[in-house]
Amino acid sequence: MFYVESRIVLIEVGGADVLARAWKAWPMASSAGVSTGSTSAGEGFFRAVRGKLAIIVVFSLIGAITRIFPLIGIVELARTLWPALSGGPVVAGRAWLVAVLSAVSLVVTFAASSISTEISHLADDDLQLDLRSRIIEHLRRLPLGWFDSRSSGAVRKATENDVSALHQLVAHTINDVITAVTVPIISIAYLFGTEWHMALACILPILIAGVLYIVMMSGGQEKYAQYDASIVRLNAATIEYVHGIAVVKTFGQTGRSHQRYRDETGRFVDFYGGWMRETTTTQSLVEIVTSPVVILVYLCAIGSWLVSTGVTTVPGILPALLLGIGLTAPLLNLGFSAQFIRNAVQARESLVAFFAEPETPQPDAPLEPSGHTIAMDRVGFSYDGEHDVLHEITTRCAPGSVTALVGASGSGKSTLARLIPRFYDVGSGAVSIGEVDVRDMAAETLYSQVGFVFQDSYLLRTTVRANIRLTRPQADRQQIEEAARAAQIHDRILRLPRGYDSVIGEDAHLSGGEAQRLTIARALLTDAPILVLDEATAFADPDSEAAIQRALSALAADRTLVVIAHRLHTITNADQLLVLDGGRIVERGTHAELVARGGLYHDMWRAYEASRTTGPTASTTTEAHQ
Amino acid sequence: MIRKLLSLASPRGRSLLRRLIGWIVAGAILQGLAFLALVPWLRALITGDMASADRWLIVLIVIGVCYAASFWIANKLGQRSATEVLSSLLDRFGDRLVDLPAAWFSKDRSGEMADIATRGTVFAASAPYAIMRPVLSAFITPATVLVGAVFLEWRIALVMAVSVPLIWWVFRWLQVMTARFDRDQVVAVGESSSRVIEFARVQPALRVAGSSSIAAGLIDDALHAEDRAKRRMHVGGGAGIGVFGLVVHIAIIAVIILGTWLALHEAIGVASLIPLLILVVRFTEPIWQSGALGGGMSIAANTLDQIQALVDEAGLPEPATPATPEGHGIRFDDVTFGYGGTPVLRHLSFEVPDGSMTAIVGPSGSGKTTITRLIARFYDPEQGVVSIGGVPLPELGSSEVLRSVAPVFQDVYLFDGTILDNIWLGNPGAGRQEVLEAGRRARVDEIADRLPEGWDAHVGEGGTNLSGGERQRISIARALLKNAPIVLLDEATASLDIDNERAIQGAFDAVRTGRTLVVVAHRLQTISTADRIVMLDEHGGIAEQGTHRELIAAGGVYARYWSERVDAAGWRLTAAQQVTSTSTTSQMKEN
């Protein structure tokens, strides 16, 4: 990337675009703690490091200012020793003083910039820890529905990429910016103070480089956007290539996918090469004009001319020879990090957006439910605020009853089930448990009432024991083992290398069905009076189906159940069936009633029965299913 | 690092790289010479010898022009070699992926590979120019100056020379130490980000747990461990860079003090001292900063190592002239195989007669899918022989094996194209009518009817617009179109909705006729209608094999498995009555 980046640098540094953006990313920092009217989610973004900012700035300043002192010291040393040339007396004390001061300022500049670097890195550590902890805090408060759609990708990006990308901003940018601004200003001031002809001469290369920057800047942003886009395309092509290659290989030919990959890499190389070619000339010019050798030779020539024409003396040109060479380096250095700064600014924006995701509102005065009756009153819900996926749902589930939600995929049954444990808040109407709206309950109260077993098995990479007692950390050994036994998983756990102390994913590799039974053991231990089972009969592991069923039966006993099922026969004994179609309850009743009614459920049941009993090869099993 | 890059680049890239490095070295030496020439020029100027000063100025200008030219050429070469190396790395990478054995892809590598392609190759291609140049310059230029200084003022050169080994030693030490801290840090970062992602993933369960001490403890530990590792790295690495800087600075201070002393004792002319001091002080920065560049170099080297590892990845042995199989019966002879660790299959022997259907059943983790992978020669067994038509697979060769086998795996990958395109993949030579026919037989027509664009509907990246059952139907159509004599079928484990269940049944029936079929079976219907059943045990062996009737009659492991599955199929959920099985189990057992 550096090759590309060194270009971008040149494109952007001149325009001070990077600086402006980096500055914008520091609303707190730029005004040293005074709010500058940023968005509320951006408030205190850098709170963890605010105290350290002043220290970093001070040390960076000291480092930047003293950086020039040793050079000035050498000039002064030359002046002090100058009389020796014409055989005059030299003030030895002054020479030593200058030499020692130069040495000291070398140490000071080195120490100050090291300290500023060190502190800013430690500040970055503080910020990263703080941000990651805040991400965790925020995750705890987001609506559960948020995790359905995008969780792992977004969370991965926030914690890994975004937080790390901020490193540049905190650990480097302050120091880099201060150095890039201070060193040239002080140098030029000193040069003008000593010999203005040479000072002017020193500014010329910067001006030329500036003009060339501007030439390069034109169209640079657009090119960079194109570069980003071509990276995205190459990324997609590679992913498809790798995914598809397994398929392609098994079909014995490597045509399509390979071609697409080749096309994309070809396009990428062409773009990259073209961009390099276009900018190499200007970039080379800039680099040559600002290179120490060329500036040195140029200053030597000017100095020679000025001395020989008597405009100035040799001591007059010395400062320029020493300081003139180093004027551009800090700017280039800042430029080198332009891309990192850009990423950091984007990362901050995306983290601010993440923190701005609305949290689940909590009641000010939480209420306690009385009883375990679930009631839905004219519930409507929409994911996007435009298209309602549930309309006017009204129903009651008596304590200890079984309610089955039935319907085609997309009918809204999963959404409806998720409203009970408040994965989402209703758009209109209300969901209540024990006569209390779920929105008026404290989260702990709600989740002590409602347990759920979904297809995902939500296991943590820790011991089996800790996984079972996750929701009741105080549960003792005996209670844990009882739950595991009831969930038909105790024997399997004992066969693991370290039994209950085996760690999931390390020495406990469980099949889908086994993981599901472990989750059921956890739910048994939680002992919530209401249980929502989402497709609990769609097993991840058909070969342990029977064991899961026994576990589920143990779990279902004496609870209020809400079940979603594809296999209709499993819920024929339910107390009530709610048949959903297009987000509405179109039929309700018992299995027998609904079959007799001859409506939608009747048709579904017929189709289901047919699928289990017909088919040209099914004759041997027909009886089995009836 | 240069060696690694040269070995990976194309011949053209190699020659460009060699020339590039040559010019970078030339530029660095010229830079050193320019600074050296400063000394006699300034000395002449100070002593008022204008003729000599003009001569040296001309030398300076010549060096400057040569330097600019070398810089210019190096830049052009850098640009060309970056493009050339990028292109050859990407090609090398792409070609290599095609050659890798199918087994290599059994794990999802797409993230890792996309990272190599987009970030790694660009970084590696630009490294010679962007990283090598500053690093080479940081060492070659001072070295040139040092050698020159011996002729100009040996005492100061001696002080500089003494510091060189020390600086070098500290530089190496710094690199080693940084690498160690970096490794620890990478581990801690990986651990904490996987914890955070886990925390998000299991969030629904954690809500139930409230402010669970268990989960909070796990995540806190990981975050603090990461913080500690980072601090160790920043404090340790910072101290290391500090020591490096200190050594460099001590050397410079020694030169300043020595120079002053020499000048005051008139052992050295002021005219010589001043330019020498300019030299020394101006070179502090590049050397000091080369410490950080070393890091960039090791990142580039890591990327090259990744690509090299890919190139070195071993393939399966292939025959010079592939043998011809007789028929398409499949045979396992005393096969033992594991994925590196404990064997999944142990001393497995069974036969699948030509044209028959064999169902493989067994508990989860017993190696059912592994058997189909061995038939498709994703791997060769560690021991024993897998053969098709009487020929061991290594003699048949991978391409011949893949020609005879059409796999329908559980998790089907579809390309981001149309339904039709994805079926076509099975046999690109087929005509449109044949493709439609294969689609129809696998009941893909029902999917096409449902979608507005019909057969030309896009399936989305990886087929995400379709359900699992629908993807598997397309994959069956693909296998039908390929018309291979052997079909390997891994049945979906998750239960399907009614429509898919029926459609897949129809598709299976279409596949069966006239082919050798090996099915990893979960559905009772599939199992009971197989010609032969191979029942695996939990230890990678075969518990029983035979026909459904034989095995039921034997009343062994299979019979128990069957009755349990049949019971499960009739299970109902009730609150009042715990388990209700309404199936006529007894009737089945007699079956």
Image (spheres, coloured by chain):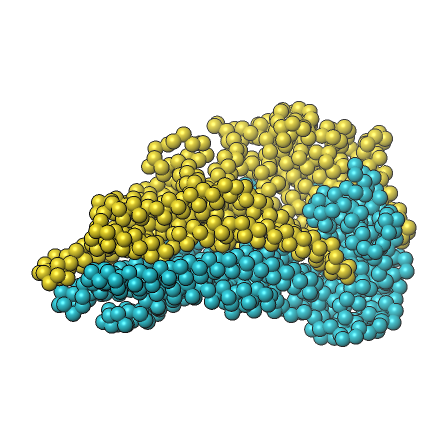
Apparent colour of chain A: yellow
Residue B309 in which image quadrant:
bottom right
Which residue: 90% across, 57% down? B513
- Residue at 80% over, 52% down: B424
Residue B484: x and y in percent read 84, 61
Q: Decide which of A617, B288 is in the foreground and name it.
A: B288
In the displayed structure, would residue A319 be above or below residue B70?
above
**Residue drawn at (78%, 33%), measured in percent from left and top?**
A590
Which percent across, then down, holds residue B33?
Answer: 34, 65
Q: Is residue B163 above or below residue A438?
A: below
Whether B246 is drawn above or below A360: the answer is below
Q: From the top left corner, tell me how far across and down residue B378 is, in percent.
A: 72, 65
| Residue B222 shown left or right of residue B494 in the figure | left
Q: Is residue A101 left or right of residue A345?
A: left
Q: Is residue B235 visible?
A: no
Q: B408 or A107: which is nearer to us?
A: A107
Along the viewing direction, whichever of B236 and A575 lies nearer the viewer = B236
Question: Residue B13: image x %, image y %?
Answer: 57, 64
Can the viewer see residue B313? yes
